[in-house]
Structure formats: structure tokens, C-alpha cells
Amino acid sequence: MKQKSEVFEKFRNWKIFVENQTGRTLKTLRTDNGLEFCNQQFTSLCDEFGIKRHKTTPYTPQQNGVAERMNRTLLNKVRCLLISSGLSKTFWGEALSTAVYLINRSPSVPLLGKIPECMWTGKDVDISSLRIFGCSAFVLQNGDKLDPRAKKCIFIGYPDGVKGYRLWLRNHLVMQKSKPQLFEEEKMKNIPYSNAIGSVMYLMVSTRPDIAYAVSCLSRYMSNAGLPHWEALKWLLSWKSQLQNIVALSTTEAEYIATTEAFKEAIWLKGNILWAPVIWL
């Protein structure tokens, strides 16, 4: 809703939808004292269908704690989604819709661990289509033979009534009605990124403290790693392998390596002294 004047129309449509889907009638309506709820339209509608009105005491939002707590929960989730995805605040609406979508498909404490969507439809919820908000996706496109077969987009939510995804391509929205997209996270499922990070961390703690900064940066993306992070990790390993020709597994072996390098230098100096030409003055 863009304006509060749309509240009555939205509520009437919601009432018809809920009663049609559940087969039950709305009996009680609890609101605050906002003018969008306290008007002649709401009063006439409640009188017509026999809906009982409950209003909170002025300046006591605690009496409407369930709604206020959910509003704060949604705000926290929207903030986390925007920060983790790196998207701007203009996508707060998509983040809010995604947060509501995920809450309705997650176990709820007031429902004794049951899922709201299951309670609503009576069917099991399929979570195989869930994706990470803000992840990269590739939309298939039809074109000439030499044109690109896909465009890189950003996943920003789930559309209503369509078995697909909402994707952002530059400055406009693209909504697919099917599932031909290829998500980057599907490629990362077969890549041992977390195992590689763990091995590099062990190496950093044992003998290679100089790579601590690079490892700390790469370890931030263990839960949502992409192909660029994997390439950076491989570059880190290849850089270390090219920089040194001997690898130590412990601090003791590192001391042995230093001793070996010193002996090599001594042998080189000894050879130069033995074969150096003698100049008589």
C-alpha cells in the first residue's frame, strides 16, 4: 500500500480471501486507534457482518504486542537480508516479501513447532525451491546463435501464484514463470569451499601467519560462497605454492627448512672460495 487510505479496500479483499480459503468467518477485529481503522467504513463493515471490534488504549502499543513484535521481527529480517546481499535500500519491499515468505515456511513456536503454511493448506511444504536472497542467477534467453544464452541477474524473491523467481536485471525486474534459471549456488554445492578454508586456516595457524588477512576475508563467505571467492582461494594456494618450493607441516619442520637453506648458502660460499682465482700482488 502506498497510502493509508487503501487500508479498508485491502482489508475487505483479505477478509473475502481468508473466509473463502478456510471456510470460516471473521469474528473479531483488533486494531489500534489509527484513523485508517477508526472510520465509518470499518464500522459499517463490522456491523454488517457481525464482527466484534477490539481497540487498544491510546499510547499503549503493548496491548497490540503480537502485531508490534512481528513488525519488529520483519524489520530485523529485512535489515539482515539487505546487509548480507549487499543490495540497496530500494529493495526493502522485495526483502520484506521474502522475509514473510520464509516465516510462513518455518517452524513456529506458538504453533508448537508446526509450519504456518502447512496449517493453512494442509499440505507439506516444498523447500527445495528456496534460494539465498541476493545470490546470482542466470536467466535463459532466446536469441541468435551467437548471442549469449543467459543473462546474469540477482535473485530478489518469489512471485505470488507463479512457480518461478523474481530476478533483478540492472534497472528493471524480470519475472520468470518457469524454472530454467541456473543459480550460482548450485555450482558451489560440488565445490569443497568450506573444507579448503579449514585447511588453509590450519596452515595459517601452524606456519603461515602471513596469509591471515586473506584467509579472514575469504572465510566470511563460507555460508554463501560464489565462484569469484573460489577463484580467489585457488589463487591464494597457487601463489603460496609458486612462492616457495618447500612446504612445512609444523614449526619444527620450518626450523629444519631454515637450517637447510643456511647449509645451501654455506656450500655455495665454500665452492666459490675453492674455485676462486688467486691474484698475487
Image (cartoon, rainbow, N blue to C red):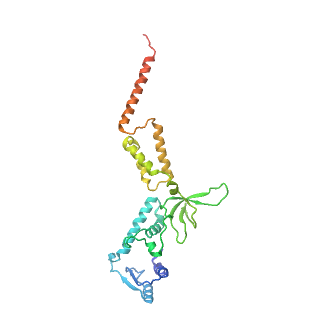
Q: Is residue 107 above or below residue 23?
A: above
Residue 69: percent from left, percent from top: 36, 71
Residue at (40%, 82%) from the top-left corner? 29
Q: Is residue 115 above or below residue 187?
A: below
Residue at (48%, 38%) from the top-left corner? 242
Residue 40: percent from left, percent from top: 43, 86
Residue at (62%, 57%) from the top-left corner? 149
Residue sitting farthest toward the top = 281
Residue at (42%, 46%) from the top-left corner? 199
Q: Is residue 208 above or below residue 87?
A: above
Quadrant placement of the C terminus: top left
Q: Quadrant of residue 177?
A: bottom right
Residue 219: percent from left, percent from top: 42, 51
Using the image as rendered, state which of residue 15 and residue 127 is in the foreground: 127
Using the image as rendered, state which of residue 16 and residue 56 is in the foreground: 16
Q: Is residue 2 visible?
A: no
